[in-house]
Amino acid sequence: MKILLPLLVILVLASVYLGYKQIVQTPKKGSATIKSITNTTPSPSNRELKTFQSKIMKFTIALPDKLSAIDESSRVKIQSSKGEIFVNRNGTQFNDLDTYLSNFDQTTQLDISLDENMIINNNVARKRISKNPNIGIEKTYFIYAENYVYKISTSSEDLYIDLDQIAQSFRYTP
């Protein structure tokens, strides 16, 4: 009996501690920040993907099956019931993405809340979330490839995970 009581106390305290630790580590619903949303990466293993290639704009991407792409003369429009993602391509005389974006920022009025450097399939890239007075909040990937800057963007927060998937699959195909 003397041994059982201390053992029981230890077990109760351990279960309370582990339960408390689990509660503290479980994120509350609706408490996600922009940072956690933008770091969410889709799992290709549980998504059906199809390849889309724009011969006009010289790129290939992987699209989730639920999305459809239209190759327009000046952009690619990717549609879903949740909104649209656009892929634009601009030729540039700038030799790098930083210089291009520095000039871009001087000519646009954006309130940038996230600006992250990255490499996407050997191309220098930047991921941004910004507030545009004409569009609202927009998530954008800028990808630099051989004096072209590809802008892949959406203003639909419901498409952020799809946008991440598409941008990460981007391949320049000259």
Image (cartoon, grey):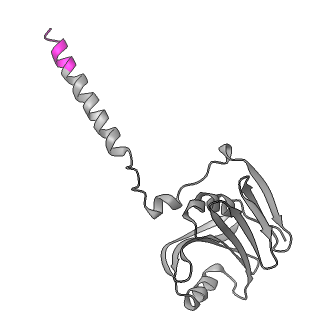
Q: Residue placed farthest to the bottom in the image?
A: 107
In front of the other: 136 or 15: 136
Residue bounds of the magenta highlight: 1-8
Quarter of the figure with residue 103: bottom right
Magenta segment includes 2: yes
**Left or right, 80 with reference to 157:** right
Residue 150 location in percent, x, y? 70, 75
Going 78% across and 79% down the picture, which residue do you hit? 74
Q: Residue placed farthest to the left in the image?
A: 2
Q: Is residue 123 above or below residue 7?
A: below
Magenta segment includes 141: no
In front of the other: 115 or 42: 42
In front of the other: 150 or 95: 150
Q: Is residue 136 above or below residue 39?
A: below
Going 75% across and 81% down the picture, which residue do you hit? 147
Q: Residue placed farthest to the front in the image?
A: 81
Q: Quadrant of the C terminus?
A: bottom right
- Please, what is the dominant secondary structure of the magenta stretch? helix
Residue 160 location in percent, x, y? 58, 61
Going 49% across and 77% down the picture, which residue do you hit? 112
Q: Quadrant of the N terminus?
A: top left
Residue 138 location in percent, x, y? 56, 72
